[in-house]
Image (tube, rainbow, N blue to C red):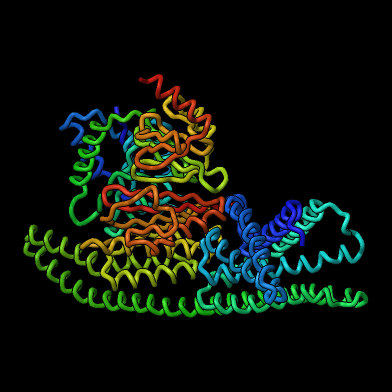
């Protein structure tokens, strides 16, 4: 191989195209909605080809490695892209690996299938490299649009975001990616008359892979929903126990009430006005203290008419009660629907309540207040808590910020990331006089 | 004169409150008057005019299909954004926070075994005290709309505006909060005038809140938070800060 400048440049562009195609596929695979913002993180991709070319030159000097050169290089590229995806998407390693392998499979498949064009004599050696490059990226773009259209990313994202399935998925996809790479290399050994079959096999394989992923995601989703339903049932039982406790209280109260009334009648008969007033206010206070609070709590929970949301809040309320956090929940009107994916809303709510009570725990008398208000299709959420730590407004929304030390505060940034996908939401944060407040408004799309 | 409106469908309670308020006004010689004592929301709404800064005593548990205390409060807020709302309730377990945050309700009084009059009079005294100390001119407030809800932020608290990552959304930063609302920096720039400088495509900074400027790294700090400066922003900053000196 000749090491001329133009050769190097073409090599650079070649690798660059590959990396970019992989990057674009990553967008589709992860169901990215804030595409423009993510594109800014594509800059390091311009650097990768240089490393790759240096590697190629390095490996040429070791003759034993030449046979495996392609695989070693592919593996290193895959690793580099994985770490890049980890950085650009703020993924964990396994998430990044799974996503990169999936994108890699699509990209390798495209590389393989684009040979059809050479086979059909559409392209040959004389075609300018720029045209080939643009054509290649154009095909990637079209494929990505198709993937978005088919909502492949939405399903795949489910697998990525699950804690249990992501490692398995990563291994599976890595194996499939290796197979795809081998298939790509095999094209050089296929006799021309079988090339047609070969391309069909590759296409079928990648479609099957994609369908397998969607199938796995759907199964995972079904299992998760099942689990959630069981949780809902369990929480419902707790709720019923609460109601049962209220019923018992009412019975004992009725008993006391009769006694008090008898006392009142006597006092009235004897004309003791002062004593009468005293007993009356005792009665009123007694009711509020013993039953009022419980009734308040159960009506508020009863107004939460989205099972997923109710179940989440019930479990958070129980957790808070166990930790000794005073919690007040207000749901004035029935909440029947939120104009965003229910699971996304539940995730947001979970993040906000977890942050709130964890921060509140630093105080001697921790409290958290949750207000949900539904009005004409709009849902308003406000979570507030007491806090003592110093707030760093400059860093609060960055990844990993937390008053508890680094690595804990992934919450707020993923909260923001979820909301970016919903233009009908507005969120506000304030921290004044020892009260930290998070507000979220979800507008109804009429 | 400040107008006081009353709405409660229990006649006895309403009369008690009205009497107590009128007596209080007479004794303390407040510049106030109970102009309407309504038994239903409809009756009250017919009497309320737009834009007056009134005081409203409203029953939470109105027996009306369409109007409960909260909805009535929303409507009154719409007509009279700076009025004072006080709620009357028979339950101590009212969803009070909701009323406080959404309607900026001032206080609530509980109907109990004791006469409600003194509580209402006490409440009126507190309102009077607050109105006296409140000299904030509405013109010095920045109004932002989040859905139906209207928020008033004192102009002097605003550090800067920043474009949010979601399209058409803007963040408003104060020393103790960050709020997201629908808007554009361009409109805000013309609306707010000279006291704010557009230092960057994505930043509109209050001139008097700028603490430090680092022209080398194209950054400035307002309220301890970092903002960016563009080339055009630099020129504007020089002109503004240079002109002030």
Q: Is residue A28 something that shows in the picture?
A: no
Task: Report which quarter residue B131 is drawn in.
Answer: top left
Q: Which residue is drawn at 64% across and 65% down?
A: A58
Provide residue A151's location: percent of width, then percent of height. Answer: 67, 64
Towards the viewer: B217 or A412: B217
Look at the image and tell me in which quarter the N terminus of chain B lies. Answer: top left
Towards the viewer: B84 or A81: A81
Q: Which residue is drawn at 28% across and 78% down?
A: A248
Towards the viewer: A129 or A147: A129
Provide residue A308's location: percent of width, then percent of height. Answer: 49, 70
Q: Is residue B60 something that shows in the picture?
A: yes
Q: Is residue A40 above or below residue A24?
A: above
Q: In this view, does A353 lie to the left or right of A15?
A: left
Task: Report which quarter residue B133 is drawn in.
Answer: top left
Provide residue A329's location: percent of width, then percent of height. Answer: 35, 62
Q: Is residue B80 left or right of residue B28?
A: right
Q: Which residue is drawn at 41% across and 35% down?
A: B214
Q: Residue at x 26, y 30 (%)?
A: B32
Q: How many labels does the image show?
A: 0
């Amino acid at each position: 191989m000749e090491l001329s400048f133009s050769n190097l440049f073409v090599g650079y562009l070649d690798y660059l195209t590959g990396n970019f195609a992989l990057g674009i596929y990553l967008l589709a695979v992860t169901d990215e909605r804030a595409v423009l913002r993510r594109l800014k993180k594509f800059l390091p991709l311009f650097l990768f080809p240089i490393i790759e070319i240096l590697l190629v030159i390095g490996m040429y000097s070791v003759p034993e490695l030449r046979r495996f050169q392609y695989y070693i290089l592919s593996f290193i590229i895959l690793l580099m892209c994985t770490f890049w995806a980890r950085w650009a998407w703020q993924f964990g390693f396994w998430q990044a690996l799974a996503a990169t392998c999936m994108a890699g499979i699509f990209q390798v498949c495209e590389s393989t299938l684009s040979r059809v064009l050479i086979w059909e004599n559409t392209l040959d050696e004389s075609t300018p490299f720029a045209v080939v490059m643009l054509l290649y990226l154009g095909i990637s773009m079209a494929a990505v649009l198709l993937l978005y259209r088919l909502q492949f990313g939405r399903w795949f994202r489910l697998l990525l975001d699950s804690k249990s399935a992501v490692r398995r998925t990563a291994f599976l996809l890595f194996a499939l990616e290796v197979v795809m790479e081998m298939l790509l290399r095999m094209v050089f050994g296929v006799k021309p008359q079988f090339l047609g079959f070969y391309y069909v096999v590759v296409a079928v394989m990648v479609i099957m892979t994609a369908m397998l992923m969607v199938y796995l995601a759907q199964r995972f989703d079904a299992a998760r929903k099942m689990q959630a339903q069981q949780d809902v049932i369990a929480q419902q039982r707790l709720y019923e126990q609460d109601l049962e406790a209220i019923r018992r209280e009412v019975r004992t109260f009725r008993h006391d009430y009769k006694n008090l009334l008898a006392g009142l009648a006597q006092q009235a008969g004897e004309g003791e006005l002062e004593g009468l007033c005293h007993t009356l206010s005792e009665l009123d206070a007694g009711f509020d203290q013993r039953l009022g609070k419980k009734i308040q709590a159960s009506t508020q929970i009863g107004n939460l008419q989205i099972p997923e949301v109710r179940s989440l809040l019930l479990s958070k309320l129980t957790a808070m009660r166990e930790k000794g956090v005073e919690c007040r929940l207000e749901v004035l009107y029935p909440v029947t629907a939120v104009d965003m994916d229910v699971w996304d809303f539940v995730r947001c709510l979970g993040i906000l309540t977890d942050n709130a009570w964890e921060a509140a725990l630093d105080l001697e008398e921790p409290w958290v207040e949750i207000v949900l208000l539904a009005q004409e299709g709009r849902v308003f959420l406000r979570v507030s808590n007491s806090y003592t730590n110093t707030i760093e407004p400059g860093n609060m929304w960055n990844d990993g910020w937390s008053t508890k030390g680094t690595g804990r505060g992934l919450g707020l940034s993923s909260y923001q990331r979820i909301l970016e996908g919903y233009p009908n939401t507005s969120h506000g944060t304030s921290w004044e006089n020892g009260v930290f407040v998070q507000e979220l408004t979800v507008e109804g799309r009429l | 004169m400040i107008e006081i409106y009353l709405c409660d469908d229990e006649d006895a309670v309403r009369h008690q409150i009205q009497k107590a308020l009128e007596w209080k006004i007479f004794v303390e010689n407040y510049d106030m008057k109970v102009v309407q004592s309504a038994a239903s929301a409809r009756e009250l709404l017919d009497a309320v005019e737009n834009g007056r800064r009134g005081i409203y005593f409203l029953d939470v548990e109105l027996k009306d299909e369409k109007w409960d205390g909260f909805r009535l409060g929303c409507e009154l807020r719409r007509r009279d954004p700076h009025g004072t709302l006080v709620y009357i309730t028979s339950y101590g377990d009212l969803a009070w926070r909701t009323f406080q945050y959404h309607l900026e309700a001032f206080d609530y009084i509980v109907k109990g075994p004791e006469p409600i009059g003194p509580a209402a009079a006490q409440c009126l005294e507190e309102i009077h005290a607050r109105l006296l100390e409140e000299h904030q001119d509405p013109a010095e407030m920045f109004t932002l709309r989040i859905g139906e809800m209207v928020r008033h932020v004192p102009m002097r608290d605003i550090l800067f505006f920043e474009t949010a990552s979601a399209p058409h959304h803007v963040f408003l930063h104060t020393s103790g909060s960050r709020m997201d609302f629908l808007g554009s920096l361009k409109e805000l720039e013309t609306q707010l005038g000279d006291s704010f400088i557009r230092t960057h495509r994505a930043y509109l900074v209050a001139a008097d809140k700028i603490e430090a400027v680092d022209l080398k790294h194209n950054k400035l700090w307002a309220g301890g938070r970092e903002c960016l400066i563009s080339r055009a922003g630099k020129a504007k900053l020089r002109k503004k800060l240079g002109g002030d000196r």
